[in-house]
Amino acid sequence: MIPCIVSQTPMIIYIFHFLIDYSELVFTVVDITTTVILYLSAKKTALYLWEKQKCRKWSVDVSEILLRPKSLHWLPLHVAAAYLLNPLTVATCVARSTCAFHNLLLALLMLATQHNSIMLSAVFLALASYESLYPVVLLFPVILQLAQKEVKGKLMLQNPYLLCFILEYTVVFLGCLSILLMLSYSLLYSSDFIPAVYGFILSVPDLTPNVGLFWYFFTEVFEHFRLFFICIFQLNTFIYTLPLIIVLSDHPQFLMFIQIALLAVFKSYPNLGDVAFYLALLPIWSHLSRYLRNSFLVLCLLLSCGVLFPILWHLWVFSGSANANFYYAATLAFSTAQILLISDYLYAFRRREFHLKYGTDIKTQDGRKMMVELK
């Protein structure tokens, strides 16, 4: 395997050896299958959110921000339409990007987790991690989601049942991942695929322009600083996991959504299919829209970047009347829009949880309306 030409796992390459003549049909079927699975997953999520709302006690004046059965009824259809009809999904399918398979595995992982299937979720998490490494961070929201049904008592580290479950699930996950790696070894009779695939993802040797943050920076950075900044950039992908777990430990489904979105921004080789996947999940959290602060700005940035990407690429690569700075400016704006979107949804979720607990009309001791500010 030559990393500069292709950087895919041996099993993906082996499968495509038989499917290459039917690639258009294969990618179409994969996207349609992903849409159906997202529909089923959203249906299960809607039921989960409704049951969770009924089981909790709220403040007396929060009826206006509670979930309604009517809005939840159409939620799965909105998710399916948001994925299948998204121009980014269509572009990914037309380009025949293997990101389509990655999205399929993530959708299967979400569905298996919501059905509380320990074995299936471990298998799909192992497959997703085997395919692109970064989904390993989803191990934590998956464990938290499954532990709500499988573990007795509160989900605290002092709980021995939780510690046993974490160990058990991690062993199952690592076992599945080891089997995949051994199958890959049996195909090649060599372990060269490990540095060729995972070393390629971590060391970022290919600086072909994309919609991510890595390529331009490492084109400009001095070689003797490269390793240091590689570590910093890669650490940025994983460092948010622990604080998010602390803040969202009681809400693993929202935690998984945030983690998937962060991976789409900070991974070394992102593409439009990654963005399309987490954008399709936004209708699940449509009840947070009243608390969003930057939705108009984010929408304008995403639309303008979608228009500018092909124009600036053509001016740079084909016309020669622009340079890399123009295209990278668009990628920076695109990443900024995504970060604003993710932070806005995180803020909205925390703000809604605060109002559900303390009420929407909070007043000071002298009767004045209190302004809530989350920092």
Image (cartoon, helix red, strand yellow):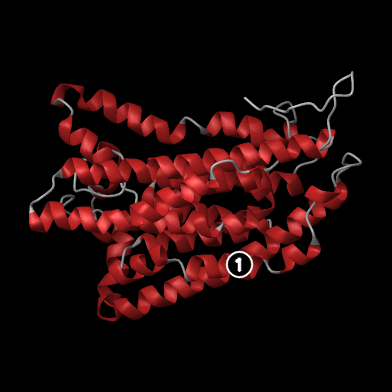
Q: How many marks?
A: 1
Residue 90's x, y, as percent?
38, 69
Task: State left or right for residue 232 relative to residue 312.
Answer: right
256 to 245, vertically: above or below: below
Task: State left or right for residue 262 relative to residue 268.
Answer: right
Residue at x 16%, y 22% (from the top left corner) = 224
Which amino acid does the dot numbered 1 rest on? Answer: His
Residue at x 31%, y 39% (from the top left corner) = 213
Residue 141's x, y, as percent?
60, 43
Question: Residue beneath label 1, please?
Answer: 78
Task: State left or right for residue 138 relative to residue 64.
Answer: left
As helix, strand or loop, the secondary structure at mark 1 comes to helix
Residue 131's x, y, as percent?
38, 54
Most foreground residue, 67 or 10? 67
Which image quarter is the C terminus in? Answer: top right
Q: Decide if residue 133 is in sight here.
A: yes
Q: Decide if residue 180 is in sight here.
A: no
Which image quarter is the N terminus in? Answer: bottom left
Residue 311's x, y, as percent?
22, 57
The residue most toward the left is 320
